[in-house]
């Protein structure tokens, strides 16, 4: 595939994704047909079927790409350590702010909440990685990590669903300070120690 074909493919997929996002503001995904999506994107059905089998496949690709971007930020947080990860959390929140519509739709209009489950699981896995790398464990850590991950996700979701008057820096500081405080309080993360 040459460069022109790659550009055409990217443009076509972007048109389809933007059209799906536009339609999802009006109705749930199960009410969106390939014909309606193609009409909105001003593309024909054969073009759609060249890349996707159905509308859910397109939605899954949007979810996967968004989760992949989020995971990159989370992996950088993990590499930085618990006491040095606030700047990477900030970068994640900047991505969320820049792609608010996509994140809003993925956290609010998913019928099976697949994106939410994957995101929370990724946060839990990150905490486990951080603690295992530092040799810190607790028999209650799985519960604590799930609690923190769900709380972090709820803060972000409330921010996305609201007017977003707080800056990414303010939200990252809030999430970071709550997470570290809970970990320290549960004696999972020693106070002020670099890990």
Image (cartoon, helix red, strand yellow):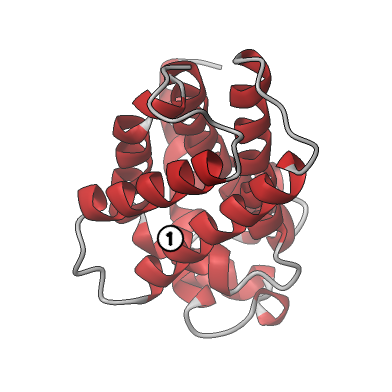
Quarter occupied by residue 133: top right
Q: Is residue 42 visible?
A: no
**Percent x, y of residue 75:** 52, 25
**Percent x, y of residue 45:** 65, 60
Residue at coordinates 21% horizontally, 64% vertically from top-left? Answer: 166
Residue denoted by label 1:
156
Residue at coordinates 63% horizontally, 25% vertically from top-left? Answer: 131
**Percent x, y of residue 153:** 53, 58
* On screen, residue 188 above or below 171: above
Residue at coordinates 59% horizontally, 75% vertically from top-left? Answer: 36
Q: Nearer the viewer, residue 67 or 56?
A: 67
* On screen, residue 115 above or below 68: below
Left or right for 13, reference 177: right
Q: Secondary structure at mark 1?
A: helix
Q: Nearer the viewer, residue 180 or 5?
A: 180
Residue at coordinates 35% horizontally, 24% vertically from top-left? Answer: 84
């Amino acid at each position: 595939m040459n460069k022109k074909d790659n550009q055409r493919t990217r443009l076509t997929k972007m048109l389809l994704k933007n059209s799906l996002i536009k339609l999802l503001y009006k109705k749930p995904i199960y009410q969106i047909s390939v014909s309606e999506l193609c009409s909105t994107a001003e593309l024909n059905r054969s073009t759609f079927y060249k890349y996707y089998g159905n509308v859910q496949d397109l939605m899954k690709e949007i979810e996967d790409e968004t989760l992949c971007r989020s995971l990159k930020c989370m992996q950088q947080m993990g590499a930085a350590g618990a006491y040095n990860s606030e700047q990477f959390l900030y970068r994640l929140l900047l991505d969320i702010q820049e792609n608010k519509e996509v994140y809003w739709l993925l956290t609010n209009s998913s019928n099976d909440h697949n994106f939410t489950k994957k995101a929370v699981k990724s946060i839990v896995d990150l905490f486990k990685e951080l603690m295992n790398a530092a040799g810190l464990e607790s028999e209650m850590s799985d519960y604590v990590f799930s609690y923190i991950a769900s709380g972090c996700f709820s803060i972000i979701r409330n921010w996305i669903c609201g007017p977003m008057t707080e800056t990414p820096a303010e939200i990252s500081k809030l999430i970071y300070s709550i997470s570290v405080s809970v970990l320290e309080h549960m004696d999972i993360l020693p106070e002020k120690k670099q890990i």
